[in-house]
Structure formats: C-alpha cells, structure tokens
Amino acid sequence: MAQVLEFKLPDLGEGLTEAEIVRWLVAVGDVVAIDQPVVEVETAKAMVEVPCPYGGVVTARFGEEGTELPVGAPLLTVAVGAPADGGAAAGAAPETTRSSSGSGTDSASASASASADSAVSSEYSGNVLVGYGTAGPAARRRRIRPQSPAVANPTPNATAGSTPTARATAPAASSASARPAAADVAGPEGPVPVISPLVRKLARDRGLDLREVRGSGPEGLILRADVERALTAREAPVAAEAPVAPAASVPAGTPAASAGERIPLRGLRGAVADKLSRSRTEIPDATCWVDADATELMAARTAMNAAGGPKISLLALLARICAHALARFPELNATVDTAAREIVRLPSVHLGFAAQTPRGLVVPVVRDAGTRSAESLTEEFARLTETARQGALTPADLTGGTFTLNNYGVFGVDGSTPIINHPEAAMLGVGRIVPKPWVHQGELAVRQVVQLSLTFDHRVCDGGTAGGFLRYVADCVEQPAVLLRTV
C-alpha cells in the first residue's frame, strides 16, 4: 500500500532559519527519484537546490514561488511504496505521517509503524542535503503531540483519486484550522510556537511578548512578518483603529498616492541589509587612505604573464600583498568577542573578496590565502567568481572570512569608505588604476596611480597600526620586490 510522506524544508546549515522558494523543479503528479532536486530556494547566503530523500509520486506542494518558508515547514508530500491490489490505489485514501487513526490497540499501532518503516526503507535515501547531515525516515521520527479538543479529530487527507488542486489545498486547510488551537496550546505558560532565533531576538529587543502574537505560519508558527505587524500595531494604535479611507478619496500627488514601488528586504538583499546595519551599529570603524604609484606592480604582472604559464590576475597580486601585510600586522586579522570582551586574533588568513552578481553583492571566501601562490589565488578567484555569477555558491563559500579585499575600482571609481564585513576587523579598498601626474625620482611624470583605503575596527588597534598596515601595502604596490623579503 502506498504511503504519503511529508518532506519538510531541511536545516540548510550555517544558522539559516528560512528560505524563499525561487523555482519548483517538480509538479504535482510527477514521479521523483530518491535524492532528486525538487525545489530551488534562496537563503540569505546562496541559491540551493533541495533534494528530496523519498522516491515516489508528488501528491502536494506547499508554497508558491516567492513564498518564504521557515526551516521545518512542509515543502511537499510524496506517495512512496507499492500500491495495494497490484497498483490500483487510485481510490485509496493513504494516511500521511502526520495523521493519526485514533483507534486500535497499542500493539496494532506498533505493528503499523513497523510496516510503514519497512515500506519506506527502500524508497528513502537518508540524505537531506549533501554536506548538511542526514536524517532518518519520517515514519521513524514519529512525534506525539498533545492535542486540544479542537484538533483531536484531524480532517482526513484527500483521496488519491482527487484532483491535484484538492490534494494541495487539503493540508493547507487543515493547517489553517489548527492555528487557533496551536495558539491556545502555547497559552500563558506553554511553549511559544517560533523557530527562528532572529524572530525571538527581534521581539526581545523591542520588548514584545511573543505569547501575544498569533502566528500565520504552519501550525501557528510565528514568523518575522507576524512580529513586525504586532510591533506596528502596538506603536501606532491610533492609526490602526482609524477607519481606512477609500483609495478614490486620496488626492493625486499626495505621499500615499506617490509612495513608489516597495521592494521587500528579504533573501540576499535582506541579509546584506541586516549585516551592514549590524556592522554600523556594533563596530566603531575608522578609515585611512593613501595614493600609491602602481606602475611597477603593473609592469611586474605584465612580465609574469609574458613568461608563459597561467595568467596572473591583479586581484591575486593584491591578495598576496594583503596576506604579507596581515602577517606583519596580525591585529587586523581578528574579530571581537563582545560577550567576553576579548579580541580574538585568528591564526589563518581566509580572504573574502567583494563580487557583484545579478543577485547582488556577495563576498566569497578564499581559504588559507596566506599559504597560496599567485597562480593558486588566481584560479580560486576565477572559480568563486564564476560560481557566484551562476548563483551556486554554498553557505560554506560565503562564511568564515577574516579579512576582506574590495576592488571597487572595477566600477570606475577612485575611492570609498567601505563598511566592514561583520564580524571581521578590517577591509582594504582598491580604487581604479589610472594615469596621473606623479613626482617620480624627483621629476614630474605620468604614472599609474591607485588610491588605497583601509577601514578598520578601532577596538582592535589604533591609528598607528592601521597606518603602518596601509603604508606597507602601498610600499608593496609601489615596489613589488618588497615581497621577496622574509616576512
């Protein structure tokens, strides 16, 4: 007999608590293989194809494209196992793993559970996302939930012979009907139905009691949008109680009529906004800058590429310079543990670099940049840049950086005061390299000049250290032979 199993949005790692559905890769009625990607989601850090650990027929999908779901929310249901009566299961009404018959003895329930495990074992891979751990079959992770009288008799699922629309809407209707009961269960003393630690922090920082918030997520789950609505209603009670005027009564040209387009801050854009805001809030940053003659650096790169072999990029040479400078000034390869009130100096240089993509600005990380050659750095920069443009970076590619190199000169600008990539302690900015009049060896000449800027966390060092680091970088740009010295 076929069994309908529910596949939930898995833990995508790196502390991610939600994801947005970008594109469904399967439709209701499609047959999926074990570990076949079924949906493409966008997290705060990357685009991810989510594979389904079950093999069978898709019976329902939860959420349209553009919908944001929390980790643990249902994604889809799959009918697995051999159909009863030689495949004539069209008129059967299979139970999902979430439903309970409410009848029979304990021994009968145990026998049914064992049968379900046996039926599913051949159609289950155990994988959720490669690299993010595995989980057992859903039938073996049975949870007994205390139910209030309002949900003691759940609505049976639609039969296999029902239309795809009916199958897709039946679980949603059941979930919606259970929300009031879930809110009742939470009660004054019960658990609060919220998963995301970001939601909890937002409510805590604004002094909002989550027990007063009614969740709009599956089974009454409280989402960030619910908390924001509650905060808005609390802070503007008069506006909330005032009658809403008809749209036709608003004169043209008023702020309400010309509010403009509203773009939600979510996904990658929302993550960038949160991180930059946190950096500005927590890090007392300062910026220093200097002009440098990059003529010799450009000549050295030309000579290296003319010697044959793989081409060396300018970004790779700048990365080598950064790694040498950080070895001399380890204060800037650090982070601040605010809870312990300690500066943590990091042993390895994991160099992030700013990359502009169709999805927005991302900062991939080159691991162990201090031990790589210019050729190895060039290859890694090229690989990560191409992966970023394809939207295929993993969370691991975007985390763990200790220092960031930002080449904003590619946009045709000379200088900037970049915002530090929290929780790092510094970022080196590089402007465009352009011919400018420059005093060289006592005479005025046209040289290739670049502006370098260093934004640093003033908690980890003072201006003397930051200035020394930037001056060493500028010296290496002006005289690349400095890199031949022993660090």
Image (cartoon, rainbow, N blue to C red):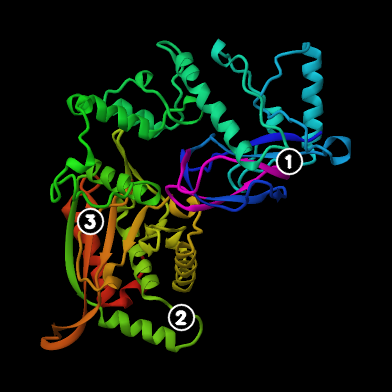
Q: Residue at x 50, y 45 (%)?
A: 64
Q: Is residue 48 magenta?
A: yes
Q: Position of residue 232 (x, y in %)?
A: 25, 30
Q: Is residue 188 left or right of residue 241?
A: right
Q: Which mark is residue 311?
A: 2
Magenta residues (range): 41-69
Q: Is residue 354 above or below residue 474?
A: above
Tell me the residue at 39%/87% (across/down): 303
Q: Quadrant of the C terminus?
A: bottom left
Does any portion of residue 309 appear in the rendered image? Answer: yes
Residue located farthest toward the front when viewing the structure as drawn: 248
- The residue located at (31%, 25%) in the rendering is 204
- Per the image, label 1 sits on a secondary structure element best described as loop
Q: Earlier in the sequence, mark 2 or mark 1?
A: 1
C-alpha gap between disc 2 and disc 1: 47 Å
Residue plotted at (35% across, 64% down): 324
Image location (x, y in percent) of residue 265? 33, 47
Task: Give the structural element (helix, strand or loop) at label 2.
Answer: loop
Q: Quadrant of the N terminus?
A: top right
Task: Tell me which numbered mark, 3 or 1, is placed earlier along the sequence.
Answer: 1
Location of residue 56 (image quadrant): top right
Nearer-the-camera pick, 402 or 182:
182
| Circle number at residue 389 | none
